[in-house]
Image (spheres, rainbow, N blue to C red):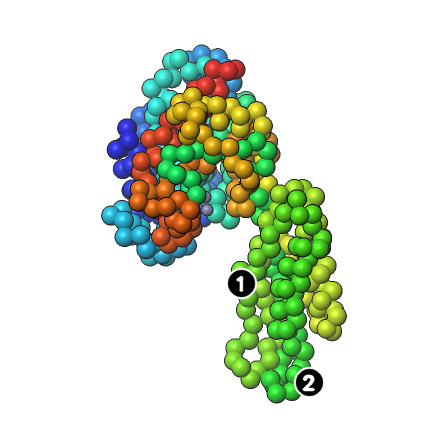
Amino acid sequence: MADEIAGLRHAIHREPEIGLDLPKTQAKVLAALDGLPLEISTGRALSSVTAVLRGGRPGPVVLLRGDMDALPVTEETQLPYASTVPGVMHACGHDTHTAMLAGAARLLSARQAELPGTVIFMFQPGEEGYAGARLMIDEGVLDAAGERPAAAYALHVSSQKLSCGTFSTRPGTMLAAADRIMVTVHGRGGHASMPHRAADPIPVACEMVTALQTLVTRKFDVFDPVVITVGSFHAGTTDNVIPDEARFLATTRSFSRESRSALAELVPRLIGDIARGHGLTAEAIYAGEYPVTVNDAAEAGFAAETIAAVFGPERSELAEFPITGAEDFSFVLEQVPGAFVMLGACPPGTEPLTAPTNHSAMATFDDAALADGTALYAELALRRLARG
Ligand SMILES: [Zn+2]
Ligand SMILES: [Zn+2]
């Protein structure tokens, strides 16, 4: 099936779509599932596909998730199947997840009669900042089989760090929580030569940016890390005009409930206090995005055992640290015990430690990982159902 899976992956890769509305990707998934003994439903608020496979024998429900969306990146890989859509690229490898999950649906469908339980295939749009998983939960994906899943698993490819074909997971915290801070500093514009007659928002906003870094080191335990990065900063039009306002956006990453709620409290307070200290005002909106992705210890152990049994122990790596990236699979794992597993897909000839990262315009994911990822999805479901 490897060629078939790669073919589907390339077709999705050529026509990437962003966000919650992925009609072309959805059509390709539906075509790939056509003829299989699945109960298929599609989303209302998003172009999701939920497919339920009822085995011939009684047993529990297992959910497998693959995300389908691309990123606003202009592809520079020169691959033969590179994106044909300017400014849009499958730079996070979600095209591989979709193709592997469709492949697993085909594999497991062939064993429907002997399957002791039910599998839900969750094809999810909008992972990259649109909380598509939460919307699918709202629309009932966790109840699609009529009973809650006993376990849920997601795979994610990595273009770097892991060598191709190596799987990695860990018990407990797997990925960070990600939140967004939107700040507007309100000053009063004027002539740049007479700043005392204006209220300059730029130096005040700059002070906020550096103070946020001090906040990280003075208010948080080093053993419960926090990241704050200001990724967007805008003010003014030219050198001799003081603008009315300055705006910046920041992302925060945290790994515990305590740190996450401390950020939500301390960041807006610090912003407001700095503005007030200079006689200005500021708005700081702290918007919650994705919670911490927490692997169930038993399910992560089961996933690692399955990887070792199917591919050999050298292919199963225990991740030493969580990842500072975030995932909306966290919303599923808040309700269902499960595990998020990384799969190395670094192409041959590239060094895992220096290869372009996921989200890079140069990120490449080797087709050689597809068959193994498909097999793992299927084996996780088969073996977990068999355990009851
Ligand atoms: Zn991503
Ligand atoms: Zn991703």
Give, as a three-letter code, the residue at label 1. Ser
> Compared with residue 149, is residue 229 higher up or lower down, i.e. above or below?
below
Specify whether residue 203 is in view.
yes
In depth, the one of 273 and 137 nearer the eye is: 273
Q: Residue 209 occupies which quadrant of the picture?
A: bottom right
Specify whether residue 70 is in view.
no
The residue under the point 58% across, 28% down is 297
In depth, the one of 97 and 322 nearer the eye is: 322
Q: Residue 243 occupies which quadrant of the picture?
A: bottom right
In depth, the one of 312 and 24 nearer the eye is: 312
Label 2: which secondary element: helix
> Compared with residue 306, is residue 344 higher up or lower down, i.e. above or below?
below
* Quadrant (top left/top right/bottom left/bottom right) for the N terminus: top left
- For marks 1 and 2, the one nearer the N-term is 2
Give, as a three-letter code, the residue at label 2. Arg
Residue lying furthest bottom: 193
The residue under the point 37% across, 34% down is 165
